[in-house]
Image: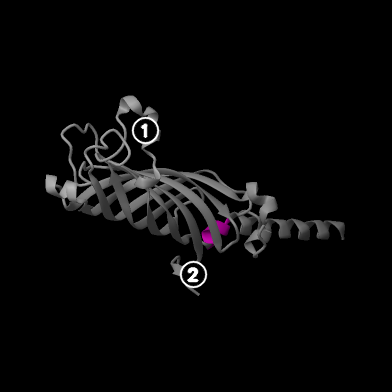
C-alpha cells in the first residue's frame, strides 16, 4: 500500500514538473506594446564635449518627445527571443539650451522604424516554472522578485525620417528627410504578472548610419546621430496552437 502511494505521488510530481518545464512552449508568441519618451542627440543643441561630461547635460525636457512601439515576439528557447518591431515617434532638437544658443536652429523629426531584434534573458524569473502559475495563479507583489526577467538585446533596423525645421534652419538650408540603417541596442526588465500578461520597462538606444536626422549635417560633427527610447511595455501572450502557430482563441 505504501509503495503504491509513493509511486502515485512520484508520478504526480513528474507530471507537474514536466508541465512546468514546458510552460514557455505553451505561449511562444507575444504581442508587445511600448510607450515612452524619446531622447535625440544630433548636431542641433547640446553642449560641447569640454562642457559636458558623459553627455548628461544634453538630456533636457525641451529635447524630449515620445514614441510608440508595437512588436511581435517568438520564443526560440526559454532564454532567447526574436522580435519584429515597428516604432513610430518624434525626435526634437533645439539650440535654445546648449553651446550654440545664438545660432537658433530647431527641428522636429518624424520617424518610423521597422527592426528585427534578438533578446537574451540573462536572469529568468522563477514564477513561470510554477505549475500553479500556469493554471492562472499569480504571485502579486509578494513574489515580485521571483517574477522578474532581465534581458539585453540588439539587432538591425531601418529608419525613415522627415524633418520639419524652424525658420532659421529653413533659411540656412536643411536636409528634408530620407532613409538610413540603425542598430538597436538596449536592456530591459519584465514583470511576469500572469500566464497571459507581462509588464516591463526598456531602455533602447539607436546608433544610426546618418548625420542628418535633424536636417543639419554639420561640417564639425565627428559622429552619426543617436537617439534613445525609455519605454513602458505591456505584453499579451498568445497560446501556441496544435501545429505550432499562435492561437487567437
Question: In the rendered image, which quarter is residue 31 located in?
Answer: bottom left
Question: In the rendered image, which quarter is residue 208 located in?
Answer: top left
* Crowd rating for badge 2 (residues with CA inside 10 Å; few <14, some 14–19, many 20+): few
Q: Measured from the top left, where is residue 47 in percent x and y?
A: 31, 33
Q: Residue at x 67, y 56 (%)?
A: 140
- Left of 44 or right of it: where is 61? right
The kind of secondary structure the magenta stretch mainly shows is: helix
Note whether residue 25 is visible.
yes
Circle 2 SS class:
loop
> Which labelled disc corresponds to residue 211?
none
User: Relative to the observer, which residue lies in front, 140 or 229?
Assistant: 229
Please state, as top left, top right, bottom left or bottom right, where the N terminus lies in the image. bottom right
Circle 1 SS class:
helix
Q: Measured from the top left, where is residue 173 in percent x and y?
A: 12, 46
Which residues, given as a range, are shown in magenta?
Answer: 22-26
Q: Residue at x 30, y 49 (%)?
A: 92
Q: Earlier in the sequence, mark 1 or mark 2?
A: 1
* Crowd rating for badge 1 (residues with CA inside 10 Å; few <14, some 14–19, many 20+): few
Amino acid at each position: 500500500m505504501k509503495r503504491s502511494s509513493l509511486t502515485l505521488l512520484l508520478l504526480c510530481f513528474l507530471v507537474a514538473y514536466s508541465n512546468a518545464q514546458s510552460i514557455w512552449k505553451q505561449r511562444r508568441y507575444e504581442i508587445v506594446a511600448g510607450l515612452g519618451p524619446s531622447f535625440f542627440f544630433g548636431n542641433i543643441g547640446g553642449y560641447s564635449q569640454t562642457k559636458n561630461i558623459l553627455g548628461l547635460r544634453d538630456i533636457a525636457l525641451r529635447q524630449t518627445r515620445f514614441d510608440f512601439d508595437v512588436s511581435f515576439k517568438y520564443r526560440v528557447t526559454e532564454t532567447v527571443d526574436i522580435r519584429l518591431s515597428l516604432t513610430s515617434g518624434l525626435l526634437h532638437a533645439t539650440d535654445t539650451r546648449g553651446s550654440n544658443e545664438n545660432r537658433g536652429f530647431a527641428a522636429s523629426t518624424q520617424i518610423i522604424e521597422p527592426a528585427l531584434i534578438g533578446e537574451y534573458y540573462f536572469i529568468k524569473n522563477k514564477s513561470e516554472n510554477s505549475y500553479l502559475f500556469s493554471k492562472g495563479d499569480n504571485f502579486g507583489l509578494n513574489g515580485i522578485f521571483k517574477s522578474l526577467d532581465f534581458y539585453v538585446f540588439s539587432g538591425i533596423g531601418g529608419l525613415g525620417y522627415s524633418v520639419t525645421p524652424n525658420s532659421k534652419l529653413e533659411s540656412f538650408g536643411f536636409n528634408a528627410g530620407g532613409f538610413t540603417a540603425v542598430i538597436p541596442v538596449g536592456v530591459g526588465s519584465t514583470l511576469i504578472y500572469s500566464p497571459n500578461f507581462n509588464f516591463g520597462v526598456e531602455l533602447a538606444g539607436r546608433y544610426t548610419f546618418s548625420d542628418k536626422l535633424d536636417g543639419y549635417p554639420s561640417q564639425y560633427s565627428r559622429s552619426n546621430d543617436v537617439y534613445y527610447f525609455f519605454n513602458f511595455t505591456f505584453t499579451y501572450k498568445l497560446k501556441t496552437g496544435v501545429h505550432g502557430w499562435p492561437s487567437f482563441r
